[in-house]
Image (spheres, helix red, strand yellow):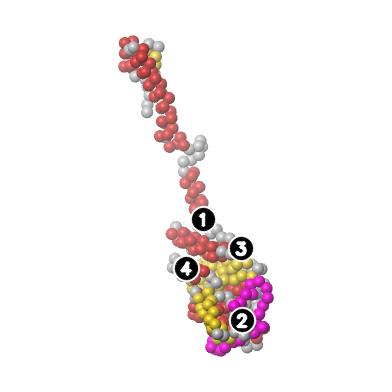
Amino acid sequence: MRLTPPIAAGGLYFHDASLAKAAPAMNWKRGFLLLAVNAFVVWLSPAFASTTDPSATVAAGTPPSAPRLATTRVRKAALDEPDLRSSSVFILDATHASVLYSRRADVAMPIASITKLMTALVVLQARQSLDEPILITREDFSAGKGAYSRLTLGTTLPRGDLLHLALMSSENRAAHALGRRYPGGVPAFVQAMNAQAAALGMTHTRFVDPAGLSSENVASPEDLSKLVMAASQNAMIREYSTDKGYAVRAGRRMIDFRNTDSLVSNPTWNIIVQKTGYISEAGKCLVIQAIIEGRTVVIVLLDSFGKYTRVADAKRIKRWMEWRLSAGLAHES
C-alpha cells in the first residue's frame, strides 16, 4: 500500500487532497471521524507491509535459503551413516562387493552362538550320517549364563535334528553333542573349526568350543561376514537357520522349538541365513544375509546393548538402505 504525504488543512492532516479542500465546510464531528480513520490507516500500513514481505520474517543477515540448507545437511548425514546402537558393525553389499558401513570391523570380540554357523559347516563337511542317533550326556552340560538348554540328560536325537536345533534355536547341548561325536571328539572338532576359519581368510578369529559358550570364541565383524557368506552356500544351513519352528520327540513327549531371531517371521524381510548369539561377555549379537532392495546384503552386529537393540539395529539398516537407494545414491567404493 502506497501512501501520499499528508496535507495540512484546517488544523488537520489528510492523505487525500480532496478531503483537505473540503475541510472548511465539514462540521467538527465529521472532521473528527475522518481524522480517526486517517490515523488508523497510517498506523496499520507498516504492520501490513511486514506480514506481506517474506524478507521481514528472516533475521537480519540470514539468507532465506538457510533453513532449507540445514534440512538438506541433516538428511544427507542420515543417508551417509545409519544411527545404530551396536558396538561393532559391518554392512556388506555382497552384490557389488562393497562395504556400506563399518564400525570396529577389524576388532576381534566374543561372538557367542554365532559360533554355531562354523559348527554347522564343519559337521556338514565331515559328511557324517544325519540320521545317526546321538545321546545327550553329562559331557554336553555347561554352567553359566547363556548355557540354557531344553534337551535333558538321556535325550536321543538324530544328528540332523541336533543340527537343526543348534542353528534355529541356538541349542547349546545340541551343538556340543555334534562336536563330541565328531571323529576325534571336541578337540579335533575345534581344530577343524579353526582350520576352516583360516581357509576362509578369517584372520582375527579363534574358536575353543563348538557351542559358543566360551568368551574365548572371538572374531571380528569383517571375519564374520566371510563366515556368513560361506554358510549361505549350503542349502541345509539356509533352511535350518531361517526355519520359524521345529518339534522333536524327546522320550514320550514332543518339544516345540522356535527361532531365536524374530525377523524370520517378519514378512518384510527376505532372510537367507541368520544366527543370533548371547553371553554376558559378548552382549547380544546378530548376523544376517538378506535381500534388501534386490541386493544381497550381509549385516553383522556385535555387542548390542539391550534385549531388542540388535533387531532394532537391523531394521534401521534396512530402512537406511531403502532411503539411500530411493535417493539415488550408488553403492560405496
Question: For mark 1, what is the residue?
Answer: 78
Crowding around mark 1 (Cα neighbors within 10 Å: few <14, some 14 to 19, many 20+) is some
Question: For mark 3, what is the residue?
Answer: 305
Q: Quadrant of residue 294?
A: bottom left
Q: CA distance from mark 1 to mark 4?
A: 25 Å
Residue 92, given in percent of the width and then of the height, sits at 53, 67
- Nearest the viewer among 252 and 37 is 252
Task: Label 2, secondary structure: give it.
Answer: loop
Labels in figure, total: 4
**Residue at the image position 48 percent from the left and 44 percent from the top:** 67
Q: Earlier in the sequence, mark 2 or mark 3?
A: 2
Q: CA distance from mark 4 to mark 2?
A: 31 Å
**Residue at the image position 65 percent from the left and 81 percent from the top:** 140
Marking on residue 152: 2
- Three-letter residue code for mark 4: Asn
Give the magenta range: 125-150
Q: Earlier in the sequence, mark 1 or mark 2?
A: 1
